[in-house]
Image (cartoon, rainbow, N blue to C red):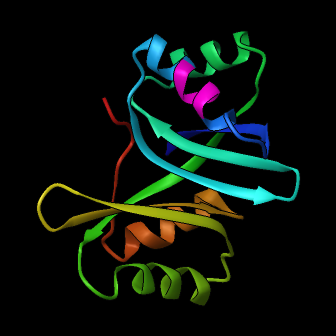
């Protein structure tokens, strides 16, 4: 499993700059990133190369921060990668609460997902032959 950082911020100009400035000053590199807005607030979800340092720095800067276990599943960067994961988990009765993805290396993509049952999801996907990333350094 991989640790994801979630930062809860007001949905206002400059807030993303404030968060990323903290990471920049701490020497933290973003590996994957998404923002979900909910009216006046947003949730910045990210995977970074130095999780504990980023978490401590953001907390010290006054942000509301949480660490969450997620799965980072490697797939070929071709049509059907997410479908194969979603189908396997859906057939097993596992719900995907959210997902984001990015391409990396040659012809590879990484799908980061938060299932409602992390252990079951990992087991189902392992049985289907999927590979996982545990960290990004």
Which of the 4 image quadrants contains residue 6?
Answer: top right
SS assignment for the magenta stretch, majority: helix
Q: Is residue 67 visible?
A: no
Q: Is residue 86 left or right of residue 18?
A: left
Across and down, in percent, residue 62 comes to 78, 16
Relative depth, front residue between 26 and 10:
10
In the rendered structure, which segment of residues is drawn in magenta? Answer: 17-21
Residue at horizontal 71%, vertical 9%? Answer: 60
Which of the 4 image quadrants contains residue 114?
Answer: bottom right
Is residue 124 shown in magenta?
no
Q: Is residue 37 visible?
A: yes
Residue 59, compared with residue 46, is above or below; it is above
Q: Is residue 106 left or right of residue 21?
A: left
Residue 36, compared with residue 83, is above or below; it is above
Across and down, in percent, residue 69 comes to 61, 44
Residue at horizontal 76%, vertical 24%? Answer: 63
Across and down, in percent, residue 78 comes to 24, 81
Q: Is residue 49 left or right of residue 18?
A: left
Relative depth, front residue between 118 and 5:
5
Residue at horizontal 62%, vertical 37%? Answer: 16
**Given the current orientation, which residue lies at the most extreme right position?**
40
**Given the current orientation, which residue lies at the most extreme front position?**
13
């Amino acid at each position: 499993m991989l640790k994801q950082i979630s930062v809860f911020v007001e949905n206002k100009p400059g807030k993303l700059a404030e968060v990323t400035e903290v990471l920049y000053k701490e020497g933290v590199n973003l590996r994957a990133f998404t923002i979900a807005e909910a009216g006046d607030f947003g949730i910045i979800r990210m995977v970074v190369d130095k999780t504990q340092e980023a978490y401590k720095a953001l907390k010290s800067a006054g942000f509301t921060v949480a660490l969450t276990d997620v799965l980072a599943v490697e797939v070929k960067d071709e049509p059907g990668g997410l479908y194969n994961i979603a189908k396997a988990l859906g057939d097993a009765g596992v719900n995907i609460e959210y997902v984001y993805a990015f391409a990396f290396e040659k012809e590879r993509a990484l799908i980061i997902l938060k299932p409602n049952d992390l252990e079951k999801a990992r087991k189902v996907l392992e049985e289907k032959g999927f590979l996982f990333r545990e960290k990004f350094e």
